[in-house]
Image (cartoon, rainbow, N blue to C red):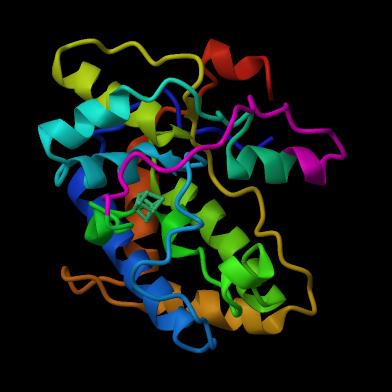
Amino acid sequence: MSPAFVPVKPDYAYSEKKALLETLYRFVEEEARAFSFVCEKGCHRCCTTHLWTTSLEARYLREDLSPELEARMLGLRAYPRPGSTPNTMALLLMQGQPPPEDQMSEIGPCPLLTPEGLCAVYARRPLTCRLMFSQTKCDLSGEAQMPPEFLGLSSLLFQIIEELDVGGVYGHLVDQVRFWRDLEAGVEEVPEWLLGNREAPDLAYLPEEDALRQRLARLYRLKLPSGKTFKETLDEIKEGFGQREALSFLNEIL
Ligand code: SF4
């Protein structure tokens, strides 16, 4: 089994990881332009409490979160929690093992929605929101309609964003915001519902999905403000991380 990025060190290489994150977000915007999605300002049917993110995305979002919005988020009582990270799930499925069950809960509207149905943190919204698109109006069709090619790309990007958050954790956005707040206050404990990120064991595309490989190759070649490519930067931070051994709370599910 490939190693998890543990012990958890969510602060590790934050400025490099932030540059990778912003580049990945830019890549998603560019890729989405190739599809005829009908989503527009004010659509918010997909804005729910199903908000699973990396700790990197949560920290990035929290940099722009007002104290009022943070309090509103932390007041949320019921929300679903993932049973595994995307890369852990991919690994277990490759090994023919069932992934741990998610902790499901009633799904409600996202606490970051404004009364006008807009996102209060639009520029900093996480990847899961940036990948929600539809080719038909959800209010008419009942759910988002996404082309298989975009769905395939989305699955890969969830694996890559976990991989680039070296030393971080995966879980619900509310738990992640609480985690960062507590870290700031000196509490270093990782709650059991935040799961250690790990490298992508393999990217879940089929050999015939060559178009996806081409898309990923473009992402890996994108230049960051440092002048290095996405791939060079990712390789450097992974190499610099060092120690990799499983935390006890991970042993149960790996
Ligand atoms: S963070 Fe913003 S885009 Fe994402 S679900 Fe909440 S309101 Fe919608």
- Residue 103 placed where, x, y %? 63, 24
User: Does the magenta run of residues contain 123?
Assistant: no
- Residue 181 placed where, x, y %? 21, 23
Q: Is residue 86 visible?
A: yes
Q: Is residue 13 visible?
A: no
- Name the quarter where the N terminus is drawn: top right
Q: Residue at x 55, y 53 (%)?
A: 159
Main SS of the magenta segment? loop
Q: Residue at x 26, y 36 (%)?
A: 12
- Residue 102 placed where, x, y %? 66, 29
Residue at the right extreme, as displayed: 96
**Horizontal relation, residue 131 to residue 238: left or right:** right
The magenta stretch spans which residues?
Answer: 92-115
Which image quadrant for residue 89?
top right
- Name the quarter where the C terminus is drawn: top right
Q: Nearer the viewer, residue 197 or 46?
A: 46
**Horizontal relation, residue 232 to residue 122: left or right:** right
- Residue 232 placed where, x, y %? 35, 65
For residue 162, above or below residue 252: below
